[in-house]
Image (cartoon, rainbow, N blue to C red):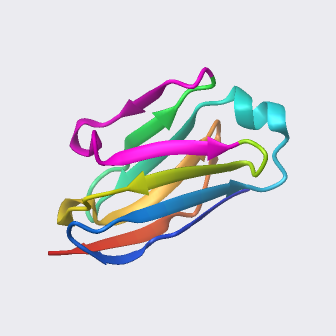
Amino acid sequence: QLVESGGGLVQAGGSLTLSCKAHRMILSVFTGNALAWYHQAPGRQRERVAALTPGGGTDYADPVKGRFTISKDNNRRTVYLQMNNLKPEDTGVYFCNIGMLWGQGTQVDVSS
């Protein structure tokens, strides 16, 4: 089970850190899968914004490069998304994905 947290309302230019806790996930599964964050803007399809490969490589969607950072804590089975310099277009629901698992999402609202 994946549980996201950390969403909220923030002004443009602000920051938020999202967390995704992988409950009851064994370490080998957590470290052996790509970890990703997706963004679903209102009325839009879900799109991947950041990914962390098992080898430690990262990949970011162009709109968030230089502003978002994905990281993890293996001991806590937790994936993070640090979001800086937030823009109104970052508004939406953010979902965590590990393998076939999805979280329920956490809402982020960025006011202009």
Q: Nearer the viewer, residue 11 or 105?
A: 11
Please state the horizontal and vertical placement of residue 71, each as a whole percent of the image.
Answer: 55, 43
Q: Is residue 101 left or right of residue 10?
A: right
Q: Which residues are magenta?
A: 55-73
In the depicted structure, whether residue 14 falls above or below residue 59: below
Q: Residue at position x 52%, y 63% from top? A: 105
In the depicted structure, whether residue 74 falls above or below residue 9: above
Q: Quadrant of the C terminus?
A: bottom left
Question: Residue lying furthest left in this view?
Answer: 112
Q: Nearer the viewer, residue 38 or 50?
A: 50
Count of residue discs: 0
Q: Residue at position x 20%, y 70% from top? A: 12
Q: Quadrant of the N terminus?
A: bottom right
Q: Residue at position x 68%, y 57% from top? A: 21
Q: Is residue 23 left or right of residue 56?
A: right
In the depicted structure, whether residue 11 falls above or below residue 57: below
Please state the horizontal and vertical placement of residue 53, each as a whole percent of the image.
Answer: 56, 26
Q: Residue at position x 81%, y 31% from top? A: 28
Question: Residue lying furthest top in this view?
Answer: 55
Please state the horizontal and vertical placement of residue 87, each as a whole percent of the image.
Answer: 20, 62
Q: Nearer the viewer, residue 75 or 94?
A: 75
In the depicted structure, whether residue 3 falls above or below residue 107: above
- Magenta segment: does it hold 58? yes
Please state the horizontal and vertical placement of residue 33, each as a whole percent of the image.
Answer: 66, 30
Quadrant in the rendering for residue 48 = top left
- Magenta segment: does it hold 94? no
